[in-house]
């Protein structure tokens, strides 16, 4: 959460209602953040314990993998980002109708207009999409994105836990989902191994714009059929040819079962 945004909200609440409501609100917010974070971690841990009984090659849910930036081309929101990491799920969630090209979104086009074409924020699609709801928090968001861009451009892409990105809170989302913002961008891995972006759009979009070659990610979910690829490779002691999946020899999500 943005420190400046927090301060502004606290000052306004204090001016309207006094000190006691501000304190109560701060306590409630802290409890909400703690509960969300604890539940996310607990679900992740329980799921992994079950997977270790069901599968021979379940991935450590907190394992970070590095994926070439140009291989993450589509965005997919079919999997709930609040149900913990390392989900294994079948079905059609990876079907084309559930995906959108990242470069076609107003987010990406707007950031490109701002940082590559030099437009003012007000002249970008990113801003125009939000102009009817622009608030102090949204203004903080623009400043945050600006800082994030210059940081990645000037210092390279750093893992999120080291970079300590301080995204502003908009409608309480940053606080509610604090557990997500301490992770790397989240991806889903489709049945054919294609990675889809699920969370962390700003970081990935900026990485693409400045030419970062690869980014660290956490895996939110794998398709059940992709998990079977991992199982086969493990069964053949990491030999992708013997497993019949030689085309995946260099796939980032198989390195732990190949090595």
Image (cartoon, rainbow, N blue to C red):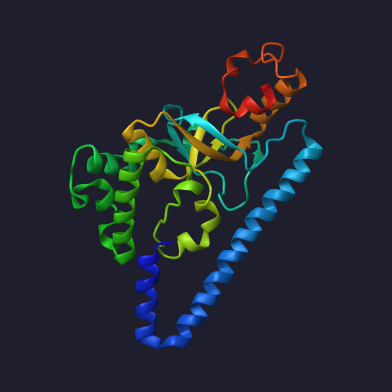
Q: Nearer the viewer, residue 139 or 226?
A: 139
- Horizontal side, residue 46 vs residue 128: left or right: right
Count the marks: 0
- Horizontal side, residue 221 vs residue 206: left or right: right
Can residue 94 be seen? no
Report the residue at 35% width, 79% height from top: 12
Q: Nearer the viewer, residue 232 or 217?
A: 217
Q: Nearer the viewer, residue 161 or 178?
A: 161
Whether residue 163 is situated above or below residue 153 in the rendered picture: below
Report the residue at 62% width, 13% height from top: 246
The quarter of the image holding the C terminus is top right
Whether residue 237 is situated above or below residue 173 in the rendered picture: above
Q: Quadrant of residue 209?
A: top left
Residue 70 percent coordinates (x, y):
41, 27
The quarter of the image holding the N terminus is bottom left
Residue 207 percent coordinates (x, y):
38, 36
**Residue that lies at the very extreme toward the right in this rendered image:** 53
Whether residue 41 is situated above or below residue 11 in the rendered picture: above
Report the residue at 65% width, 59% height from top: 39
Residue 146 percent coordinates (x, y):
29, 49
Residue 144 percent coordinates (x, y):
33, 54
Can residue 112 be seen? yes
């Amino acid at each position: 959460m943005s420190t400046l945004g927090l301060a502004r909200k606290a000052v306004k609440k204090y001016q309207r209602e006094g000190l006691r409501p501000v304190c109560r609100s701060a306590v409630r917010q802290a409890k909400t953040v703690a509960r969300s974070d604890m539940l996310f971690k607990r679900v992740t841990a329980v799921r992994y314990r079950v997977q270790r009984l069901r599968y021979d090659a379940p991935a450590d849910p907190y394992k970070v993998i590095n994926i070439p930036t140009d291989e993450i081309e589509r965005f997919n929101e079919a999997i709930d980002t609040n149900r913990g990491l390392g989900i294994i799920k079948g079905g059609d969630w990876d079907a084309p109708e559930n995906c959108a090209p990242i470069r076609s979104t107003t987010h990406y086009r707007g950031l490109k207009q701002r940082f590559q074409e030099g437009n003012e924020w007000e002249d970008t699609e990113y801003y125009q999409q939000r102009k009817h709801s622009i608030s102090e928090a949204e203004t903080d968001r623009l400043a945050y994105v600006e800082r994030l861009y210059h940081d990645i451009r000037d210092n390279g892409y750093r893992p999120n836990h080291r970079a300590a990105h301080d995204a502003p809170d908009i409608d309480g989302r940053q606080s509610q989902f604090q557990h997500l913002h301490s992770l790397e961008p989240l991806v889903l891995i489709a049945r054919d191994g294609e990675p889809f972006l699920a969370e962390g759009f700003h970081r990935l979009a900026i990485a693409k714009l400045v030419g970062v070659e690869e980014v660290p990610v956490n895996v939110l979910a794998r398709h059940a059929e992709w998990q079977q690829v991992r199982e086969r490779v493990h069964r053949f002691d990491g030999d992708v040819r013997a497993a019949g999946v030689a085309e995946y020899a260099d796939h980032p999500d198989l390195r732990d079962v190949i090595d």
